[in-house]
């Protein structure tokens, strides 16, 4: 049975917890390499246990649109041919790709096996960039005002039209955040008015999207202000079933569109404590075994759970203990964090965890020198409110393609003197 950590939002590794081996998702089977960040580069596909490239025969903007959507990287800006991002190696998996532009993944497009292509014909893509999303001013990370980040700035989603913010749009946000299903879409600044930019107006989703950036904005955009900011209440990625109230019962987690249970192997009070905290249910009073609240049905998503609320983090090679390369301690050794998607919100969590004041800056591309050993985390996506980097979305070790020249760093405001 694969293992997973609830503290790491159930589908990812926590550096003090267990490793999850999840089913490959559509986005995990394609990547962009040698570009300026994760949203541009040579197109590579994971098939039969290895990464390979795509031949540029018939490569066009419709195929690029599918790749950008699959990677949650916004819109396709340009296509590249003739190994623009450098020649790949190994197998060339696809050639003569023909997409309509509406497919959910590149694998769904018509294509041929690459029989006569060489790597000097590797295809590439430039996307507009990913759109991050978070929920603020709610009860936990799975409810609140919806905010998205565009062009490096956070802003709200606004609409006056209930057609443009109903279950479809709200459900897309919840799925993107791994927060289960939408229980209730909210309008008219239910969670308070935002400030600054209004990033999106009159969004329309059709239930098939996996990220809010995949949803188009209505052509008849209305004038909108922060009094009409939207929000959502999601079911959350964990729930308790068959108890006497919402804070007791059989533990179930939401993954791959379905609710499933947790096996009681190694289940203890530490694990129960994390569940209670996630649900806003106070302190854990007991950790029940042997289907105490009745047997569930369907998938058993998690076994051998080993949760922890404390994670060792340090900063290395900076001017003091509050600046430097970010390193985390897992499985008996220190390792680094990849700077893919690394931003000021992630830095804020690290600084808070180290009692180092506010984040002044975040650094990428091994600004503080390259580390060694394992790269434990990649694709870190914090809202900025978490108490530990372990509670942020991230990709586990072994499921990313980072190298130490992309090690992440932080500069915090506090403790100028080493301690």
Image: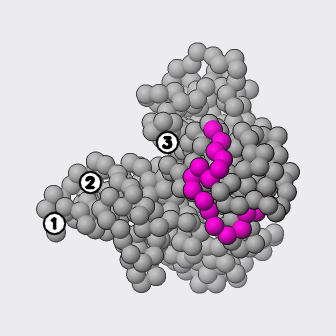
Residue 9 in percent (x, y) is at 56, 62
Residue 281 in percent (x, y) is at 53, 60
| Magenta residues, dominant SS class | loop
The image quadrant that residue 146 belongs to is top right
- Residue 412 marker: 2
* Magenta stretch bounds: 78-94
Q: Are marks 2 and 1 in contact (CB under 8 Å)?
A: no
Residue located beneath label 3 in the image: 136
User: Badge 2: few (under 14), some or many (20 or more) residues near its Cα, within 10 Å?
Assistant: many
Residue 305 in percent (x, y) is at 59, 77
The C terminus - image quarter: bottom left
Residue located beneath label 1 in the image: 418
| 375 horizontally vs 164: left or right | left
Q: Nearer the viewer, residue 391 or 322?
A: 322
Residue 413 in percent (x, y) is at 23, 51
Q: CA distance from mark 2 to mark 3?
A: 23 Å
| Residue drawn at x 21%, y 55% as measured from the top left | 414
Q: Nearer the viewer, residue 35 or 385?
A: 35
Circle 2 SS class: strand
């Amino acid at each position: 049975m694969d293992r997973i950590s609830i503290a790491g939002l159930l589908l990812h590794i926590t550096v003090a917890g267990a490793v999850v081996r999840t089913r490959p998702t559509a986005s995990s089977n394609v990547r962009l390499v040698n570009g300026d960040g994760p949203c541009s580069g040579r197109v590579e596909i994971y098939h039969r246990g290895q990464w390979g490239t795509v031949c540029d025969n018939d490569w066009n903007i419709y195929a690029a649109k599918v790749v950008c959507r699959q990677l949650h990287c916004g819109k396709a800006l340009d296509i590249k041919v003739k190994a623009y991002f450098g020649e790949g190696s190994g197998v060339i998996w696809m050639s003569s790709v023909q997409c309509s532009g509406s497919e959910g993944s590149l694998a769904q497009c018509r294509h041929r096996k690459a029989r006569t292509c060489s790597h000097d014909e590797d295809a590439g893509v430039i996307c507009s960039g990913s759109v991050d999303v978070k929920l603020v001013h709610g009860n936990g990370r799975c409810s609140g005002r919806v905010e998205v980040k565009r062009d490096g700035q956070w802003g709200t989603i606004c609409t006056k039209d209930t057609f443009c913010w109903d279950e479809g749009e709200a459900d897309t946000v919840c799925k993107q955040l791994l927060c289960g299903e939408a229980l209730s879409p909210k309008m008219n600044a239910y969670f308070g008015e935002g400030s600054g930019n209004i990033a999106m107006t009159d969004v329309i989703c059709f239930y098939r999207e996996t990220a809010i950036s995949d949803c188009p904005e209505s052509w008849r955009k209305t004038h909108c202000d922060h009094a009409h900011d939207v929000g959502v209440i999601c079911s959350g990625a964990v729930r308790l079933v068959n108890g006497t109230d919402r804070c007791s019962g059989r533990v179930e987690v939401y993954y791959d569109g379905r609710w499933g249970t947790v096996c009681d192997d190694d289940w203890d009070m530490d694990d129960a404590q994390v569940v209670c905290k996630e649900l806003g249910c106070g302190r854990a009073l007991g950790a029940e075994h042997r289907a105490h609240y009745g047997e569930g049905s369907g998938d058993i998503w998690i076994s051998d759970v080993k949760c922890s609320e404390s994670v060792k983090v340090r900063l290395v090679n900076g001017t003091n203990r509050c600046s430097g390369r970010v390193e985390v301690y897992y499985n008996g050794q220190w390792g680094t964090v990849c700077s893919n998607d690394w931003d000021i919100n992630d830095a804020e969590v690290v600084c808070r965890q180290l009692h180092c004041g506010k984040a002044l800056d975040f650094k990428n591309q091994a600004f503080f020198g390259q580390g060694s050993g394992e790269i434990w985390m990649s694709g870190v996506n914090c809202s900025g409110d978490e108490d530990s980097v372990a509670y942020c979305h991230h990709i586990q070790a072994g499921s990313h393609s980072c190298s130490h020249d992309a090690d992440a760093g932080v500069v915090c405001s506090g403790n100028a003197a080493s301690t």
